[in-house]
């Protein structure tokens, strides 16, 4: 999700399409939040991994 957000940010910046820029920012933010919650050991979306 973070990688897709970064790709959309780059495409939106180069092409000058503001909606891609906005969607990219949202995807990067949500991906980062989910990544941090998963790294803290919290169950994200009802899934908990015991590794």
Image (spheres, rainbow, N blue to C red):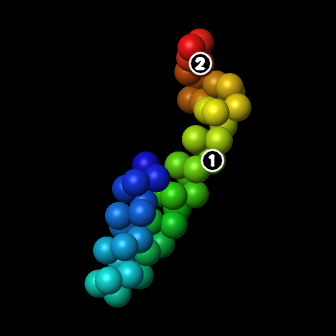
In the visual, does 22 lie left or right of 51? left
Element marked by disc 1 = helix
Most extreme residue toward the top, as rendered?
50
Task: Give the residue displayed 58% in from the left and 57% down from the top.
Answer: 29
**Residue pointed to by mark 1:** 33
Say which quarter of the image contains residue 12: bottom left
Give the percent coordinates (x, y) of residue 28.
Answer: 51, 58
Q: Is residue 23 visible to us here?
A: no
Give the percent coordinates (x, y) of residue 44.
Answer: 60, 30
Say which quarter of the image contains residue 46: top right
**Residue pointed to by mark 2:** 48
Most extreme residue toward the bottom, as rendered?
16
Task: Give the residue displayed 56% in from the left and 14% down from the top.
Answer: 51
Give the percent coordinates (x, y) of residue 34.
Answer: 59, 41
Task: Give the residue displayed 63% in from the left and 47% down from the top.
Answer: 33
In the picture, the disc for residue 11 is: none
Give the percent coordinates (x, y) of residue 49.
Answer: 56, 17
Picture layout, residue 7 above or below residue 39 = below
Q: Is residue 7 visible to us here?
A: yes
């Amino acid at each position: 999700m973070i990688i897709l957000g970064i790709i959309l940010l780059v495409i939106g910046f180069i092409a000058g399409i503001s909606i891609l820029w906005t969607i990219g920012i949202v995807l990067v933010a949500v991906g980062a939040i989910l990544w941090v919650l998963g790294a803290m050991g919290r169950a994200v979306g009802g899934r908990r991994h015991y590794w």
